[in-house]
Amino acid sequence: SAMKSEKREISTRLVEMELTVEDTERRTKQDYDKLNKVTTERSSLQRQIESLEMELQQSNDKLSMTMAKKNTLKQKVDDLEHMLEKSQKWISETEHASNEQRDMQSKIQA
């Protein structure tokens, strides 16, 4: 009877141990599944980051080119304004000389 009781106890412990092993295996599989999912998600996010970094670099390059064009155009505008000022000064001097010449002619004729 004591032997039967001991056998029953051992049998019960064996079943408990098997259940514990099965539970541990199941949890381990869940953990691996989670790990795989997280790893996949991480890779996907990493690719998105790399793509955004490329877009950012392209935008920066475009911005640099646009700024260079703007500066070139601004320089052309400055040059044209300078030429315009010179032309206006020259026109003004020519008009002044022409007026003086007319004044002289009218004095001579008078």
Image: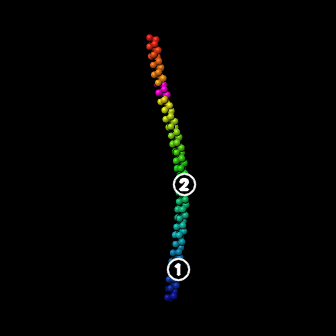
Q: Residue 1: say if magenta.
A: no
What numbered label is drawn on residue 39?
none
What residue is at 55 percent from the left and 51 percent from the top? 54
Q: Secondary structure at mark 2?
A: helix
> Is 91 or 108 nearer to us in this picture?
108
Q: Amino acid at mark 2?
A: Glu
Q: Is residue 79 above or below residue 107?
A: below
Instruction: State which mark lies toward you, 2 or 1.
Output: 2
> Is 13 or 54 nearer to us in this picture?
54
Report the residue marked by disc 1: 14
Relative image position of residue 34 (x, y in whole percent): 52, 64
What residue is at 48 percent from the left and 26 percent from the top? 90
Q: Residue 89: say if magenta.
A: yes
Magenta stretch? 87-92
Relative image position of residue 96 (x, y in whole percent): 45, 22
Report the residue marked by disc 2: 50
Q: Is residue 78 above or below residue 3?
A: above
**The residue positioned farthest toward the top in the image shown:** 110
Considering the whole magenta stretch, tell me its main secondary structure: helix
